[in-house]
Each structure stands twice: as structure tokens, then as C-alpha cells.
Amino acid sequence: MKGQLKRWIILTCALFSLLVLSTESISAKYTIRVSYENNPGEPFDLAVRKWAELFKEKTNGQGELILFPSSSLGSKKDVMEQIKLGSAMITLADGAFFADYIPDFGIMMGPYLGRDYNDIFTLTKTPWFTDLSRQLDDKGFHILAANWLYGIRQMVVNKPIHTPADLKGVKIRVANSRIFIEAIKAMGATPTPMPLGEVYTALTTGVIDGAENPIPVLYGQKLFEPARYLIMTGHIDNVTQLIIGQKYYSQLPDEIKKALTLSCEEAGNYMTKLIIQADKQDREKMKSAGVTVIEVDRELFRQASKSAYQKFPEWTPGLYEKLQGYLE
């Protein structure tokens, strides 16, 4: 019964998407929907709009990206299932989500894995990452570009936090992924998984005490309104990937594939610049709105978080040490 309901939900979402598309004035031969949780105006939304422009230019109008922000096509899980089934759709995903298919991918979202986001970019250019990407193709998902800096993850909390000990008993919203859960737990807090769209209400009603995400997302979602302390932990350099279904991608002409990939990579560079700018600007906006910004000793949190890497026996033995070797 549950399986039938699930298939009905996926089919309903797909039919709704087609109905929406039918109302668009579409002349492009290759029309692809891009689904994401971020709201209009956030850096990710602006970068996707840039990508749509670049893709249309590179294909001389044959290709078009239709954007669906604010989870308007459903949850990430539902969207990824539609993508896997062959729908003409794209979404963002990262190691935390890919780990459900290939466990080793999860380490890419580990706490303090590198010194900064450039280290994570370095890892995406290694033979190790290339091999994992090929394995992901076999699971039904193709990575178009791996150079999108989603942001440096910080916390907003309803009380001051200075050390990992201060996080004891503090309920922090995380994405529903084991690596996020174990990272926040190791840092001292109580991880509480829930969809991003439910976080503001959960903060205002006291269901949770805080949330973690890059500053532009924390600001765009207005999470600083009920949680008045911005804690600069910088615990994860969140580099995300844009994925398309391998089934659909394999049917595209080579010139469309090339244009899609190149435009995605160019938009990724644009995204990184936007994030760095927005990170500073939105931090100042939050301060102007009365938010207290707390700079912590990140080394304390780094040391506390190391135990998270011991919670994944399914990873290839010595995986953490292997990646540190690449970075050295």
C-alpha cells in the first residue's frame, strides 16, 4: 500500500510539472526543469538563472532551463526519484545525499574536512572523485558540475555559544543525512533533522534551538529572526553538485551535453563569487538587524568533530587519511 501511494505521489508531481510547463511559452527543443529548495533572490537562485542564460546562448535557443525554486516540485527525495526514472529534471545534491547510493561520497560533507572550500574543490578534481562519479552514473545520476560553492556552514542559535560544551542539549536543525547528524552530534549539540521549509516555524515555537546552513541561506530563510546569535563555526565547506538523470542525459545529443556541462561549470564559478559576496553582505545585514555575531575558536570544534569520522564503518578503510593525503 505504501509503495502504491509513493508511486501515486511521484506521478502526481510529474503530471503537475508537465501542466505547469504547458503554460509556458516554450520554443526550445530541449527543455529541462531545475528544482531546488532555495527561495527567489538567494545566491543559488541567481546562479541558476545565470546558468539558464548561458545554456540558452550556447545552444542557440535549442536548450532551455525552466526554474522551480522553493521546493515547488516537491521534496528533494521525490525530485531525485523522478530524475532517476528519466524525467527531464535537474537538482542540486551533494555527498550527503549521494552517500545513500555510494557510502564513500558522504565524507565530502564531513566537518572540517579541508582548510577551506578550495580544498574541497581540489578533492573534486582527483581520480578518487572521478571514480565515485562513474559509480553514481551506474546508480542513475550524472554529475554535470562539481564546482558550485553552496556556502560555508555556520549556526544561528537562540543563546550564546562559545565552545562545544555550550552546545550540550541544544537542538540544532540539520538536513536528514547521517554525516550532518554525526557532525553536529560530535560538535556537542543534539541534531534534529527536518525539511528546510519547516525550520522557521520550529524555531519560533521552540521545537528546536537553532539551525545550521551557509549565511546566505540563514538570511534568505529569515532564520535569524527567531535565533538571534550567529555562531561562526565554519564547520562544513559546502560544495554542491548539479545532477541530472543518467537515463535522460544519455539520450541528449553530444552538443547539448557539452553545452549543458560547460554552462553549468561557468555558472558554478559565478555562484562561488556570489556566495563570497553574499556571505559578507548578509552577515552585516544580520548584525544591523540586531543579531549578535560570535567568533569562536574553530580549532576546539575541529577537534571535537573528529569523532564523527569514526561513525561510518561502511566507508573504505583509511578514507579520511587518503583524502588528507590529496590535500597535503
Image (cartoon, grey):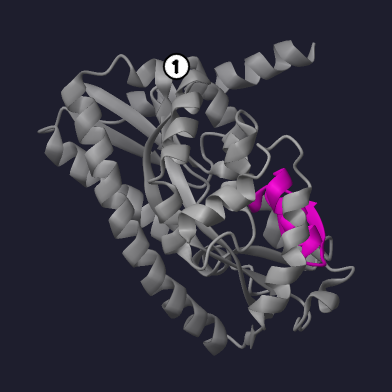
Horizontal placement of 273 versus 35: left or right? left
Decide which of 136, 93 is in the foreground and name it.
136
Residue named by callout 1 = 86
Where is residue 88 shown, x and y percent of the image? 38, 23
User: Based on the displayed image, in which of its 4 quarters is residue 145 positioned?
Assistant: top left
Task: Tell me, yes or no, whether the highlighted magenta stretch contains residue 175.
Answer: yes
Where is residue 18 shown, x and y percent of the image? 41, 22
Which residue is at a point 60% across and 30% down the rendered structure image?
Answer: 102
Task: Tell me, yes or no, whether the highlighted magenta stretch contains residue 259.
Answer: no
The residues colored magenta run 172-196
Quadrant location of the N terminus in the rendered image? top right
Task: Evaluate whether residue 218 shows in this view.
Answer: yes
Which residue is at a point 47% across and 58% down the rendered structure image?
Answer: 327
Callout 1 amino acid? Gly
Task: Evaluate whether residue 28 shows in this view.
Answer: no
User: Based on the displayed image, in which of its 4 quarters is residue 192 positioned?
Assistant: bottom right
Where is residue 234 shown, x and y percent of the image? 59, 70
Decide which of 74, 122 is in the foreground and name it.
122
Q: Residues within 10 Å of mark 1 (few under 14, many from 20)?
A: some
